[in-house]
Image (cartoon, rainbow, N blue to C red):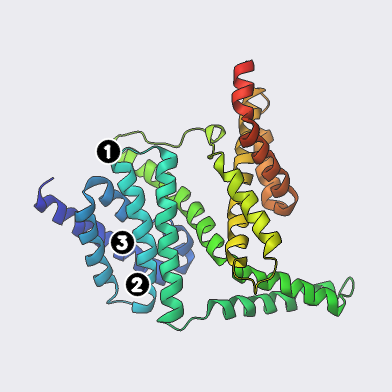
């Protein structure tokens, strides 16, 4: 690739990003959809050019976008660009879809962490206080609705408030989980766009083939043990224990859901069965996340898929 084509494409993709960024600000009806499209200029450019050239395009786009709505454009561009460039780089390196997903998750997580730090220290946004305010508002709404059918004691209200306040300590795990979800959606969209532009078929393998390292079980149990040793937010390793157990638990639940897809395919059961499970997770997450987590532990620990495949 010569420098003139890189310059031309850099200007084009940078302009597309800035137009999309403006649309996010000034067309609120479409903002949710556009948010998932914003990383695409960085993904496509990183997929086409070397990382050094991509970094130059990123810096120039960041500088230009910062001229408009400075306080909003910089954090959004950091988040979108770091994740997008990570996905584009992985696609260019011919990494597997799940390796690409992992790199994209890291990119978006780092970007979101930078946004968190910048907004808190440079823009004076106290996220802990914001979360506590949101908890208080949701608690007031909940109490007003509950008062119509019953009455909560002061002890129950205080217990609910304390449990919600603990969400502040799960911000690191929440950043990674959000990064994972955002990476999966934007990577899936980029597969479709690259197929249209380049004619190259890139796609995720069937979800039933998704599996995580067995070592994840140990991380989860280390998190549980640390939670038992450091149960109070005042303890030194409480933050590590809380986020390690939360993040590993979510990943194990995903592993368990993948096994549901695998077992349904293995038994040749109707395809709507795993779809029903997903719907139930959306409607009642607390009801199914723990059983799926246990199923994920059993699947990884006992290598259930290998055993079933060998029997077949």
Question: Callout 2: few (<14), some (14-19), or many (20+) C-alpha neighbours within 10 Å?
Answer: many
**SS category of the residue bearing label 1:** helix
Q: Earlier in the sequence, mark 1 or mark 3?
A: 3
Q: Position of residue 68 (x, y in %)?
A: 30, 76
Q: Earlier in the sequence, mark 1 or mark 2?
A: 2
**Label 3, label 2: how far apart the Cα atoms are:** 13 Å
Q: Is residue 194 left or right of residue 30?
A: left
Q: Which residue is mark 3?
A: 17
Q: Position of residue 192 (x, y in %)?
A: 38, 41
Q: Which image quadrant: the N terminus?
A: top left
Q: Position of residue 38 (x, y in %)?
A: 37, 59
Q: Earlier in the sequence, mark 3 or mark 2?
A: 3
Q: Which of pointers 3 and 2 indicates the residue nearer the eye?
A: 2
Q: Which residue is mark 2?
A: 74
Identify the mark at residue 198; answer none if there is no mark.
1
Inspect this view and state whether residue 35 appears: no
Name the foreground residue: 290 vs 301.
301
- Vertical relation: 118 (above or below) 227: below
Write the residue at 66% across / 34% down: 272
Q: Quadrant of residue 238?
A: bottom right
Toward the right, the furthest residue is 150
Q: Which of pointers 1 and 2 indicates the residue nearer the eye?
A: 2
- Vertical relation: 311 (above or below) 206: above
Q: Which image quadrant: the C terminus?
A: top right
**Label 1, label 3: how far apart the Cα atoms are:** 20 Å
């Amino acid at each position: 690739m010569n420098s003139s084509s890189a310059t031309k494409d850099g200007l084009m993709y940078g302009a597309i990003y800035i137009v999309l960024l403006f649309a996010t600000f000034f067309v609120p009806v479409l903002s949710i959809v556009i948010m998932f499209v914003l990383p695409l200029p960085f993904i496509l450019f990183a997929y086409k050019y070397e990382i050094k050239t991509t970094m130059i395009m990123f810096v120039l786009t960041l500088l230009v976008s910062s001229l408009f709505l400075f306080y909003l454009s910089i954090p959004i561009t950091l988040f979108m660009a770091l994740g997008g460039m990570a996905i584009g780089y992985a696609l260019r390196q011919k990494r597997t879809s799940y390796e690409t997903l992992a790199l994209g998750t890291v990119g978006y997580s780092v970007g979101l962490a930078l946004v968190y730090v910048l907004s808190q220290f440079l823009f004076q946004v106290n996220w802990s206080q914001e979360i506590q305010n949101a908890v208080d508002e949701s608690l007031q709404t909940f109490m007003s609705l509950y008062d119509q059918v019953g009455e909560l004691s002061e002890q129950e209200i205080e217990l609910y408030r304390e449990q919600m306040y603990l969400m502040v300590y799960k911000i690191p795990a929440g950043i990674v989980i959000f990064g994972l979800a955002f990476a999966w959606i934007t990577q899936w969209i980029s597969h479709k766009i690259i197929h249209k532009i380049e004619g190259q078929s890139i796609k995720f393998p069937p979800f039933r083939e998704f599996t995580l390292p067995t070592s994840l079980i140990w991380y989860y149990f280390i998190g549980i043990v640390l939670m038992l040793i450091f149960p109070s937010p005042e303890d030194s390793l409480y933050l590590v224990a809380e986020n390690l157990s939360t993040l590993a638990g979510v990943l194990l639940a995903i592993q368990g859901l993948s096994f549901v897809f695998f077992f349904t395919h293995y038994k040749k059961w109707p395809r709507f069965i795993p779809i029903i499970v997903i719907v139930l997770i959306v409607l009642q997450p607390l009801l199914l996340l723990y059983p799926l987590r246990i199923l994920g532990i059993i699947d990884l620990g006992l290598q259930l898929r290998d055993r079933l495949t060998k029997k077949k």
